[in-house]
Image: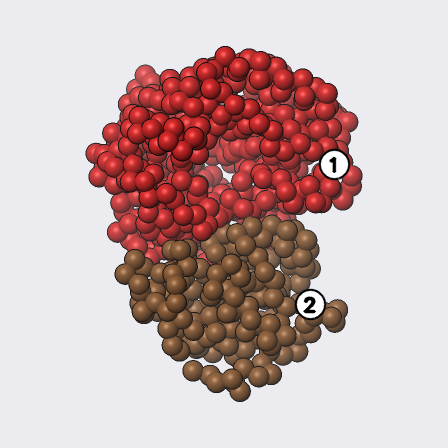
């Protein structure tokens, strides 16, 4: 598990293909440059944990619920038409599937996705697909800390590890999220085949 | 490289090379991450051998390029599968009907060619999404209201020709009925225009749909006789006022007089839209906590009996049915129509009336934020993707869904009968009923009902997917025995659904096949779409 020091000074890196945009060079908040937003559903404990970690690193966290229509229409639609920008999130199914579809139209792809749900027997199931470093970062750590692992992993480097899929069931930490599956995901520009 | 059946790699490679000369190398996708995006994320056979995958994709930028691609496909016998925005989630998305087809992705044909807010129409290309059109209308101050599906990532051309539906007034909800004039690329690459668009120089392309002679537009809807490259669409004038109301009735059988009266009101253009619900249908929203007593009734084999739900509702002073009625028009007219509605429905014992929303157009931002269903006021919204919450009824998490959507007559009696029939069917299947005496009919096709339910799909649970697949097929057969057939379906079920329209030894399918053989003898356009296969791919053909 990365300690507190490991979180300090990390930017959010886009783990993706050409064109690669190292997030350490991107400006957030006030400056006028392409932004990379982090969407978080703060209605859920996991979303709140994730959002706080991301905010602690000065990342522009957008709080969204099931309906992210306004964010899409007012913030992202125009931006993606001009410049494909990476995006990450911890959300419910709606924003996850919509952004996966919309990303496709703009030369983007979902590089990493994780499905997280509580089972009836107080276990948490996590089905993770993506580069090994992302998958390991989310699946490592203590029970209930996967949102932190996800936020941390976004600060990692690009092209780290071949794609892999991992499913794990671990004892649930804290109270169940009412059986609502949550999705962690990262969208990046696609690699064009030569 | 995967190849279409009957085509070898060399032949496909040669065709792709010619495609590249038409559209440019960067717009032909023969593998890699770009081609991976052409998969149906909601497929109930995800990762299984039945999942259909393309061999390549090509994205032209103009009608001339589409014609060029089609001619080459004809020359080489390469099957194409055309998509517009590729967002037909629940009905196949952007995956082909027939594995090995080359996807013809029309997303780059994305011009809004004309908008007229005096005659109330637009003419658009297939790559225009509902969001694009909405932004255009807003940016240019057009006083028009679009009818929107629950998925506005799609586009009006693709949605209309798949006979998609919406949520505003009357005929506008039936999207194909608002189509007026098309331009179509035929399987031989020739360009056809229909209706008044077939008259050179006519300015009435989107005024009069029929033109002269046989009305052929329907042949290009849910079919595979041509590729629509332009389409006229009627839009609703932006009304002055919107009023949403609710009528509540206490008993199960009240659905009969309720439907009868609302039919009259809607067919007389006094009511714009009706949505039937029961408060006992467990809301499919996140974080819902259904009452365990209600869940216990629902989890009975077949979904429980109306009397049990009536008792439940009465004990809690709840109505059995609610009908949300929406009105569009001048404020005085809207108010008068609502008053008349109350007068006509007032003879149902125990009926109650309430007003839900009332606002003037154009809506202020703060009003828009409060509108319960933005699609009803012409604003695109993605909230419907919140479907799929795991609950005691839906015990498996959803990675997508497919729609079971049989058409039934527009009567309360038919609704009641459908509850009995499908309740028994779920009992036979031995799975929790996904429809019950609380299921209200959908009214998108404004002169008929659709009893819709969703089955959830999974990316990982193949066993659950198989169960869904078998259940869906069984319900299609059960529905057909009662004269209820699907109005739209995913490619996996298109053959079965087409077979339910079986009058006179499947005369309809045979007629469609005759047309297909004549117009597309090589069978290159979307083989299998609508259950229509070209000669060389039909089973049992001798």
Identify the chain of the residue marked 1, using the numbered disc in the image. Answer: B
Q: Residue at x 67, y 42 (%)?
A: B368
Q: Is residue B498 above or below residue B299?
A: above
Determine which residue is flagged by label 2. Answer: A34
Identify the chain of the residue marked 2, using the numbered disc in the image. Answer: A
x and y percent of residue B320 in the render? 42, 27
Camera-side residue: B183 or B150?
B150
Camera-side residue: A167 or B383?
B383
Residue ranking furthest to the bottom: A5
Disc on res. B362: 1
Q: Residue at x 58, y 13 (%)?
A: B343
In this rendering, the label closer to the viewer, 1 or 2? 1
Give the image quarter of residue A39.
bottom right
Chain A image colour: brown
User: Element under label 2?
Assistant: loop
Q: Residue at x 70, y 45 (%)?
A: B366
Chain B image colour: red
x and y percent of residue B36 in the render? 45, 58
Q: CA distance from mark 1 to mark 2?
A: 32 Å
Residue B452 in view, yes or no: no
Q: How many C-alpha atoms fall within 10 Å of the one at disc 1: few (<14), some, or many (≥20)?
A: some
User: Element under label 1?
Assistant: loop
x and y percent of residue B436 in the render? 34, 32
Disc on res. A104: none
Camera-side residue: A28 or B439?
B439
On the picture, is A107 further left or further right than B386? right
On the picture, is B342 further left or further right than B199? left
On the picture, is B303 further left or further right than B261? left
């Amino acid at each position: 598990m990365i300690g507190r020091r490991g979180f300090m000074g990390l930017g959010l890196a886009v783990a993706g293909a050409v064109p690669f945009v190292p997030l350490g060079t991107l400006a957030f908040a006030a400056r006028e440059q392409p932004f990379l937003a982090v969407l978080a559903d703060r209605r859920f404990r996991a979303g709140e944990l994730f959002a706080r970690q991301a905010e602690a690193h000065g990342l522009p966290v957008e709080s969204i619920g099931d309906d992210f229509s306004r964010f899409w229409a007012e913030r992202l639609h125009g931006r993606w038409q001009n410049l494909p920008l990476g995006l990450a999130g911890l959300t419910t199914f709606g924003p996850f599937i919509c952004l996966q579809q919309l990303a496709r139209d703009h030369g983007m792809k979902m590089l990493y996705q994780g499905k997280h749900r509580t089972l009836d027997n107080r276990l948490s199931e996590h089905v993770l697909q993506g580069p090994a470093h992302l998958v390991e970062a989310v699946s490592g750590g203590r029970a209930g800390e996967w949102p932190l692992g996800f936020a941390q992993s976004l600060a990692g480097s690009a092209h780290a590890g071949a794609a892999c899929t991992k499913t794990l069931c671990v004892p649930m930490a804290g109270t169940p999220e009412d059986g609502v599956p949550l999705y962690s995901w990262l969208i990046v520009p696609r690699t064009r085949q030569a | 490289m995967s190849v279409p059946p009957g085509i070898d790699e060399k032949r496909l490679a040669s065709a792709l090379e010619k495609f590249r000369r038409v559209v440019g190398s960067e717009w032909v996708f023969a593998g890699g991450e770009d081609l991976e995006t052409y998969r149906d994320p909601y497929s109930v056979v995800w990762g299984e051998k039945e999942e259909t995958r393309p061999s390549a994709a090509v994205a032209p930028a103009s009608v001339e390029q589409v014609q060029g691609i089609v001619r080459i496909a004809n020359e080489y016998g390469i099957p194409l599968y055309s998509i517009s925005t590729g967002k037909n989630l629940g009905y196949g998305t952007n995956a082909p009907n027939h594995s090995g087809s080359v996807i013809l992705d029309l997303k780059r044909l994305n011009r809004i060619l004309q908008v007229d807010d005096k005659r109330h129409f637009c003419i658009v290309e297939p790559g225009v999404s509902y969001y694009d059109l909405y932004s255009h209308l807003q940016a240019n101050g057009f006083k028009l209201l679009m009818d929107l599906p629950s998925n506005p990532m799609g586009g009006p051309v693709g949605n209309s020709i798949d006979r998609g539906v919406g949520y505003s007034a009357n005929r506008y909800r039936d999207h194909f009925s608002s189509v007026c004039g098309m331009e179509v690329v035929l399987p031989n690459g020739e360009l056809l225009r229909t209706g008044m668009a077939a008259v050179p120089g006519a300015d009435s392309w989107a005024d009069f749909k029929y033109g002269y002679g046989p009305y052929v537009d329907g042949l290009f809807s849910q079919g595979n006789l041509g590729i629509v490259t332009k389409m006229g669409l009627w839009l609703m004038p932006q009304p002055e006022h919107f009023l949403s109301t609710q009528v509540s009735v206490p008993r199960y059988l009240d659905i009969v007089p309720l439907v009868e009266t609302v039919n009259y009101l809607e067919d007389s253009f006094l009511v714009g839209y009706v949505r039937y619900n029961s408060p006992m249908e467990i809301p499919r929203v996140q974080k819902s906590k259904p009452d365990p007593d209600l869940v216990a009734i629902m989890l009975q084999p077949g979904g429980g009996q109306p009397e049990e739900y009536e008792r439940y509702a009465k004990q809690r002073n709840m109505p059995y049915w609610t009908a949300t009625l929406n009105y569009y028009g001048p404020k005085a007219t809207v108010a008068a129509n609502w008053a008349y509605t109350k007068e006509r429905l007032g003879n149902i014992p125990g009926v109650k009336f309430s007003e839900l929303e009332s606002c003037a157009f154009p809506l202020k931002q703060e009003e828009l934020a409060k509108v319960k269903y933005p699609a009803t006021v012409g604003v695109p919204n993605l909230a419907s993707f919140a479907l799929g919450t795991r609950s005691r009824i839906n015990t498996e998490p959803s990675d997508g869904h497919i729609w079971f959507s049989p058409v039934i007559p527009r009567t309360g009696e038919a609704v009641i009968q459908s509850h009995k029939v499908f309740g028994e069917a779920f009992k036979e299947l031995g799975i929790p009923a996904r429809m019950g005496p609380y299921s209200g009919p959908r009214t998108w096709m404004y002169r008929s009902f659709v009893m819709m339910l969703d089955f959830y799909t999974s990316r990982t649970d193949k066993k659950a997917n198989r169960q869904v697949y078998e259940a869906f097929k069984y319900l299609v057969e059960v529905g057909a025995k009662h004269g209820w057939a699907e109005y739209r379906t995913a490619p996996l079920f298109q053959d079965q659904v087409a077979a339910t329209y079986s009058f006179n030894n499947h005369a309809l399918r045979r007629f469609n096949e005759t047309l297909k053989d004549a117009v597309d003898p090589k069978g290159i356009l979307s083989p299998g779409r609508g259950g229509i296969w070209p000669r060389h791919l039909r089973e049992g053909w001798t």
